[in-house]
Amino acid sequence: MIRAFARWRPSISVAIPLLLGLFLVLVGVGSLWAESRRQMREFEEATVREFSSELSRLSLQVIRHLDAPSSDLPTELARLSSHPDVTSIAVLNAAGEVLLANRQSWAGQSLTRFDPQLRIEQLLPALMGLQTTLDWSADRQHLTMMRAFRLSQGNQQLRGIERGLVYLTLDLGPSRALRLERIWQERLPELAGFSLALLMLGMLLQHLVARPLRQLGAATARWGQGQLSARAEETGSREIADLARACNDMAQTLERARADLEANREQLSTILYSTGDALLATDTLSRITLLNPVAEALTGWTEQEARGRTVEEVFRIEQAETGLPAVIPVRQVLDEGVVVGLANHTVLVARHGKRTHIADSAAPVRRGDGSLVGVVIVFRDVDEAYRLEQALADSEFRYRALADAGASLLATADTQGNLQWFNRCWLEFTGQSERQAVTSPWQQRIHPDDLGALMLAWRELIEQRQALRLQLRMNRHDGIWRWVWLEARPWFGREGQLLGHLVHGLDITEQREVNRQLEGQIDELQRWHQVTLEREQRVIELKREINALSRAHRQPVPYPEADIGAPQEDRR
């Protein structure tokens, strides 16, 4: 049944009134249900108010009747019991025994005898309060109401009763049913009006929508067969007439589009054959269908000669280093439907043997529906770029060999001072690989006593772009602290932008030791020189004393004054 319903294709003149009818039925039923609930709620509230007032008045009459018996209370009970909704009414003591009731047989009996579902415990909440207690049934068809009364002190001693209850039960089922029936009767004219409106709507849809749409469908079928001269009748509602008019305009536009398509095809062909890159297209069997002039020049084949040949025959490519045939990615593109590029260092061997370095990619060619119809290979001559790349690689090799040839420790740092590249001497000094040198903190190799000065100078290098020069101790791979002369300078680009920092280090441990020894020898020579000078001065003094003694004894002086200088007193 479900499959049959799924295959059911009603006309719009049936479907719309049917759906609208279902909607109106749902709305009507919902409205009716809401109205019923509202009126039932109002009916219940009115019933509770009415009988709460009756119970309040009746409890006062019970108190007066027990104080001074009269016929008013039985009369009132009879009046209430005549109400169509009232099923029973009784006056109970605290033990649940009937004092008065609308049924004489109940007097003096326990109420639980006539109402088996009632328990004495259910009377306690009502006895303890002075408000009317309500107890609805689960279907809200029956209502039990109880109101407590309390006798005066004198009546309690006289009657032996302190408290009691006025007990009332109502059956609201007939009244509720009557109200529901009245609601349905009030809504019948609305339902009849809805049915008539739906019938008129169906007729209107048949005239304004269904018939014009069938005519438009017949016209579109003829257009689908290529009969673009056919015209649809512009009848029906304004929207459908406008749609038919638009379809007629579309049929006329299609004819013009054919001519435009041919012109665009010619323009696209011109673009393909005029582009600066070489283009080669194949079908799904890897047979060439297009070869533009640039591709003709690189391959040595004309398009007419290459058309229909396999791509391997016309597009011969080899690996530049080995000379082995390279894989043409046409088959991979056909199998996977993705764009594929050639491997690096690929050489195209032309028909006449010329070898050209090329860069290319192959992409699938698809129809509008996504189906694969072939592959297009776009390639270009990169001989000059390859030559420049090789020259750059050779230059980098030379500079790296130059950096590794000396005994200096060389490294480069980024603009934030993080070391990024190291020469061979640096790596041999630290005993690390280049990866380890980059990832491990270089500060760990600086002696703790020298680290503070280095970090301060390094900060000035980064912030103020000032050169760094200092001697410090670095830990060699064997754990020995070596003295290193370290110099770092900013590294600028052509336009003056900071590219990083160049770091140069030189192990000066042996030089410092030699300098220390030389300084010791110089100190020793200076000490001996001073001793020699002092001894010579003492000899001169002795010679002067001998000359002085000789003069005192009037003898010739043995030492010429020119050699020893004049005595101190003579100079004065």
Image: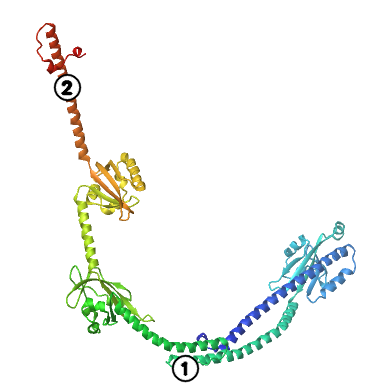
Label 2 CA crowd tier, 10 Å (few <14, some 14–19, many 20+)? few
| Residue where numbered disc 1 is placed | 230
For badge 2, the amino acid type reads Leu
Give whichever of 209, 28 is nearer the camera. Answer: 209
Q: CA distance from mark 1 to mark 2?
A: 134 Å
Depth check, front residue: 51 or 279: 279
Q: Position of residue 286 (x, y in %)?
A: 26, 81
Say above or below: 563 vs 203.
above
Identify the secondary structure beneath mark 1.
loop
Q: Is residue 282 above or below residue 165?
A: below
Judged left or right of residue 459, residue 408 is left
Residue 373 in sight: no
Residue 477: x percent and y percent?
A: 24, 46
Is disc 2 placed on a helix, strand or loop?
helix
Depth check: give the residue in front, 361 or 123: 361
Does the residue at mark 1 contact the one at mark 2 (Cβ under 8 Å)?
no
Percent position of residue 488, x then y: 29, 47
Image vertical order of residue 201 relative to residue 343, above or below:
below
Q: Which mark is residue 533?
A: 2
At horizontal 44% and vertical 90% (from top left) the residue drawn is 224
Classify residue 205 as left or right of residue 420: right
219 left or right of 410?
right
Badge 1 crowding class, 10 Å Cα cut-off, few under 14, some 14 to 19, many 20 or more, is some
